[in-house]
Amino acid sequence: MPIDEGLRSELSKSGIFTTTLESIYNWGRKNSVWPLQFGLACCAIEMIATSMARYDLARFGAEVFRPSPRQADLMIVAGTVTKKMAPQVVRLYNQMPEPKYVIAMGACAISGGPFKQGYNVLKGIDRYIPVDVHIPGCPPRPEALLHAFITLQQKIDAQTMRGPNRARHFDPDEPSEFPVPEFGEKDLVPSKNLSVWKPPVILREA
Amino acid sequence: MASDYSPNLFLAVFLFVALGFALTPVILSNLWSRFFSPAKPGPDKSAVYECGLESKGDAWIQFRSDYYLYGIIFLIFDVEIIFLFPFAVAFLDLSFGAFLAMMVFLLLLVEGLVWAWRKGVLTWR
């Protein structure tokens, strides 16, 4: 139950600090996001630069890149997702424990990028897994990844434990796994997961 | 006054504190996960982690144990080399007794090598 803001400021004037379980929980969660150590292409170089001293992702509590999905909260899809790699990406996402988040980094990960017309590149990883933050750029600068990270932190902070805006892991009805595509005759089968991806509606003037 | 207490009492207190220190966070986090974070297992999530690839075959396979003999022989001669270096450096200043001792040491090791060789350990089957 959210505290009335007036009551809270009244209490803080007389030296009483009040908070909610929810804000403490979200504060802890947003400042200890551990990304999966997982790079697919050139964007991974920028991701590495972001985690190093100059851009210092550690300021946001996310410097611990975990080599196992069992210990990771955040998947940064950094680079071109080829159709050969897509099943592995989805499977890794499935193997991460809740609560989990995805940042699609760079033009390739969000849409296929310069290889969109190619036969072997997935046209955006959001066709298979729910992406929280998309970053454009080819590749995005480390500042862009930091910005995406701060955006994700804001998103985590706004999530509640009850109600319609609750985080995924509080909802028992949310699926724990997304279908892993398989190699078909011409394309991945299924070629998209319509429960997470809505095809863009193209409006043409008559 | 100083001898009023039993030293075992301290041990009991420390044991209690240590157990509480170790178990309280575990119990709290278990309670938290029971009420706030429902477990969602699934076939993929519970599968063996293999870099995103599906694992093939069984993880419980047998390794050949023959290698350990190679390992032991290598280790012995590796240590021998360490002894040979100071021996070679101080060779001209050594007394005859020291020289003899070193030769006996070498002889024992060479004897072991000959034994291992004749036993057929050095042949990989």
Image (cartoon, helix red, strand yellow):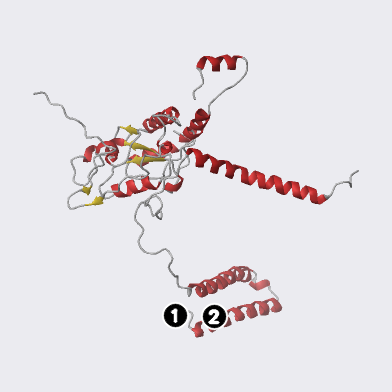
Res A169 label: none
Crowd class of label 2 (few under 14; some 14 to 19; many from 20; radius 10 Å): some
Judging from the image, what secondary structure is the residue with disc 1 in?
loop
Q: Is residue B9 placed above or below B88 in the rendered structure?
A: above
Give the total of numbered labels: 2
Q: Which residue is mark 1?
A: B123
Closer to the camera, A167 or A31?
A: A167
Q: Nearer the viewer, residue B5 or B32?
A: B32
**B15 relative position to A93: left or right:** right
Indicate whether A57 appears above or below A121: above
Residue at the extreme right = B1
Q: Residue B12: percent from the left, percent from the top?
A: 75, 49
**In terms of sequence position, does the residue under pointer 1 or pointer 2 come before the other?**
2
Question: Residue at horizontal 52%, vertical 14%?
Answer: A6
**Location of the N terminus of chain B (image quadrant):** top right
Q: Chain of mark 2?
A: B
Q: Is residue A147 left or right of residue B10?
A: left
Residue A42: x and y in percent read: 32, 41
The answer to whether dots 1 and 2 both sit on one chain is yes
Q: Amino acid at mark 1?
A: Thr
Mark 1 and mark 2: Cα distance apart in space: 13 Å
Q: Quick one: which residue is furthest to the bottom in this view?
A: B118
Specify the quadrant that holds the C terminus of chain B.
bottom left
Which residue does the numbered mark 2 point to in the structure image? B113
* Above or below: residue B118 compared with residue A72: below
Vertical side of A71 occupied by A58: above or below: above
The crowd level at tag 1 (other Cα within 10 Å; few <14, some 14-19, many 20+) is few
Q: Residue at x 57, y 81 (%)?
A: B112
Type of the residue with mark 2: Leu
| Quadrant housing residue B29 | top right
- Would residue A195 appear left or right of B14 to someone viewing this image? left
